Amino acid sequence: MDNRTLILTIIAGYMLICLAIGVWAAKKTKSSADFFIAGKNSGILVIGFAAFSTVMSGFGFIGGPGLVYKFGTSSFWMCLAAVLGFMTTAVLLGKRFKVFATLFDILTLPDAVATRYKSESCRLTAGLVILLGVIAYLGTQILALGAVASTFFDIDFTLAAIIGMTVVIGYAVFGGIIAGLYTDVFQGAIMMFAGVILFWIALSTVGDGNFFAGPRNITEAFTAAGQRDTVGPWGVLGPMACLSFLFLFGLGGSGQPHTNTKLFMPKDFVTVKWSMALAVTAYLLCALLWIGVGFAMKYLVVVGAAEALPPGQEDNAAPIFLLNHTPAWLAGIVFSGLFAAIMSTADSFLNIGAGVFVRDFPQAILKRPVKNELTWARTATFLIAIASTAFALWAKNHGDLIAILGMFGWGLFAAAFVPMVAIGFNWKRATWQGAVAAALTGIVVNLGIDLASKYPREDPFYTIPNGVSVGAVALLASILALIVVSLATKPQELDSRVEAAVNF
């Protein structure tokens, strides 16, 4: 069996296991509560792996090495700050969300928002933000699927993306979040192994077989090539950009609905505590791949051992390194890890997006739930997958890097949900008007500055100086909007159970 066939066989086996989990989960999915939050009865291992794997995603495993290749240590301020994101989520929302899920009939994040603020306007706004962010984030995952599969299999990018999404649809449509959670356990284990082993191989490659010589060789090679900033504390982008990443990914982690929703699922408070600790540990191990492979590929280019990646194709850093510098059996496992990172996030976003269409929009607009929620949830999951694939192919033609598109989705969620949820569920003075104003401010600032920085293409209308992240500016603006509008509007009288949950 040749190397490529062996790799393909391992990947095919991985895909079949994911589909088998989906078939098993479909038999356990009897209600919309099962489909959206797994019956609120999940344990430490399941929640911990699900939380970290949905955050790591194709953004980290594919986009991360591409960012290191392009911007050097600047991207460290993203991946390491994301660890703070897990911590802020645990502190600000962990036990509080479990109380809300116990006291109320909550299946989605907009459910919780509507309950906290006694406002269907808040539910509708939260649903709109989720829908916009889901399309962007799913686009990130689909681009990553296409980048990996097209690079390895040497097939058309569009065909590669469609094949990957077909597998995701296969288990997400029928198995719902139960399928997602249990595939996350399997996928998370692969991702951790891939992160650690590939970090070792990457540094050993640049160290001429000596792992411990790798960092020294990288530093010396970049210094000799006049690229010392690449390995400096701020990287290529500089301190202002890096500090904006720290703000966006540290505090912004508590505003990510794909993580927040997992906090409705634990069976008890002990699970909440230890699942977040597990998520932090697993994420750190997986982030090693982000760091190691990105620097290894750039090092090989600097010393003339590999061809430079063309501008706009930095996302190919990880797939190319795997094909050229790892044994076939290991490449198969690590490629499966790459697919795992992508698919674990894709199924989570399909699930929360379906919840918006099936549960949140009908209740906010029609003032009643739809009948046969489970059937409609599966239908909505399928339609969102199709729409997101179309968006991803459009984004590919416009040259957006996977990680840049992922940053936009992260920033959109952070700007809307950090004020509305992370702050609002801890500050009783926050009003529904302030929450809506914050979310709308986040949307307008994010989309407005992002579009202004890209169009017209020859001479963009406006770009934030010093590489500061658009998402960080939008997050700051939305927090200010929440505070100002809440203090300017009449305080709300909270339901006694809501007040107890906020005070918990």
Image (spheres, rainbow, N blue to C red):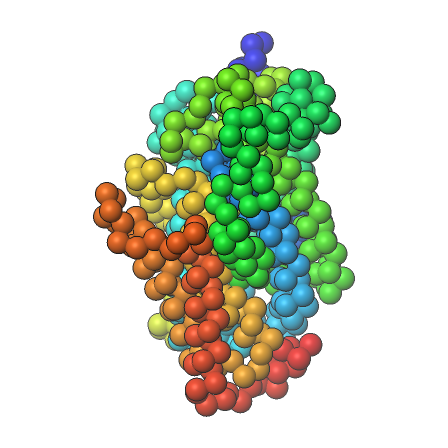
Q: In the drawing, does residue 363 fall left or right of residue 200?
A: left
Q: In the drawing, does residue 240 fall left or right of residue 221?
A: left
Q: Residue at x 49, y 51 (%)?
A: 241
Q: Is residue 344 above or below residue 473?
A: above
Q: In the drawing, does residue 220 fall left or right of residue 170?
A: right
Relative image position of residue 122 (x, y in whole percent): 43, 74
Q: Residue at x 69, y 18 (%)?
A: 209
User: Which residue ends up furthest to the top in the rendered image?
Assistant: 1
Q: Residue at x 61, y 72 (%)?
A: 100
Which is nearer the eye, 335 or 451? Answer: 451
Question: Quadrant where the C terminus lies?
Answer: bottom right
Which is nearer the eye, 503 or 294? Answer: 294
Can residue 29 be seen here? no
The number of callouts visible is 0
Q: Residue at x 70, y 25 (%)?
A: 213
Can residue 236 be seen here? yes
Question: Quadrant where the N terminus lies?
Answer: top right
Relative image position of residue 217 (x, y in whole percent): 64, 25
Relative image position of residue 482 (x, y in whole percent): 46, 75
Relative image position of residue 320 (x, y in whole percent): 50, 23
